[in-house]
């Protein structure tokens, strides 16, 4: 869970600051620069939900939102013809997040 939290915090702040790497990536993918704010806020809210043990449903929404972001990131990189390394990177992060969620002691349990 710690690597995922570090990823979310680092890239969430980078998105909100609209660093040159972030703006270049968004431009390359065809997204407007202000889209970085949505991504950054989403990542930081997800990190907050993962840090707070009693987040309940918010934790599940964080997993769902990040899944949508990483799948869309894979699709975006594929549609612009990026290299396989750029295409697969979001899916690797998604796999790490899935493993973290599977072993998350605070995730909701089915009754």
Image: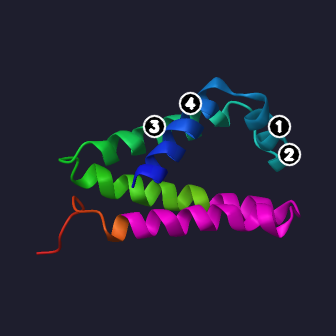
Q: Is residue 62 above or below residue 99?
A: above
Residue at point 74% right, 32% down?
33
Q: Label 1, label 4: how many angstroms apart (C-alpha)?
A: 16 Å
Q: Residue 24 shows which numbered tag?
A: 1
Q: Main secondary structure of the magenta part?
A: helix
Q: In this figure, which residue is indicated by the disc labeled 3?
A: 44
**Residue occupying the far left of the picture:** 111
Residue at point 49% right, 43% down?
6
Disc 3 crowd rating (10 Å Cα; few below 14, some 14-19, many 20+) is many
- Figure quadrant of residue 68: bottom right
Disc 1 crowd rating (10 Å Cα; few below 14, some 14-19, many 20+) is some
- Figure quadrant of residue 76: bottom right
- Which of the marked residues, 3 or 4, is nearer the chain's N terminus? 4
Q: Is residue 104 magenta?
A: no
Residue 70 in the figure: left or right of residue 79: left
- Which of the marked residues, 1 or 4, is nearer the chain's N terminus? 4
Q: In this figure, which residue is indicated by the disc labeled 2?
A: 28
- 3 and 4 marks in contact (CB < 8 Å): yes
Q: Secondary structure at mark 2?
A: helix
Q: How is the image coloured?
A: rainbow
Residue at point 46% right, 62% down?
97
Percent x, y of residue 20: 79, 29
Residue interval drawn in magenta: 71-100
Q: Label 2, label 1: how many angstroms apart (C-alpha)?
A: 6 Å
Disc 2 crowd rating (10 Å Cα; few below 14, some 14-19, many 20+) is some
Q: Residue 13 shows which numbered tag?
A: 4
- Which of the marked residues, 3 or 1, is nearer the chain's N terminus? 1
- 2 and 1 marks in contact (CB < 8 Å): yes
Q: Label 2, label 3: how many angstroms apart (C-alpha)?
A: 24 Å
Q: Nearer the viewer, mark 4 or mark 2?
A: 4
């Amino acid at each position: 869970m710690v690597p995922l939290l570090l990823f979310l915090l680092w890239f969430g702040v980078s998105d909100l600051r609209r660093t040159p790497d972030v703006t270049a990536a968004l431009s390359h993918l065809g997204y407007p620069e202000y889209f970085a704010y949505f991504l950054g806020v989403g990542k930081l809210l997800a990190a907050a939900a993962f840090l707070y043990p009693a987040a309940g449903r918010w934790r599940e929404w964080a997993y769902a939102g990040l899944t949508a972001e990483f799948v869309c990131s894979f699709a975006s990189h594929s549609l612009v013809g990026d290299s396989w390394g750029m295409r697969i990177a979001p899916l690797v992060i998604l796999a790490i997040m899935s493993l973290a969620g599977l072993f998350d002691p605070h995730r909701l349990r089915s009754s």
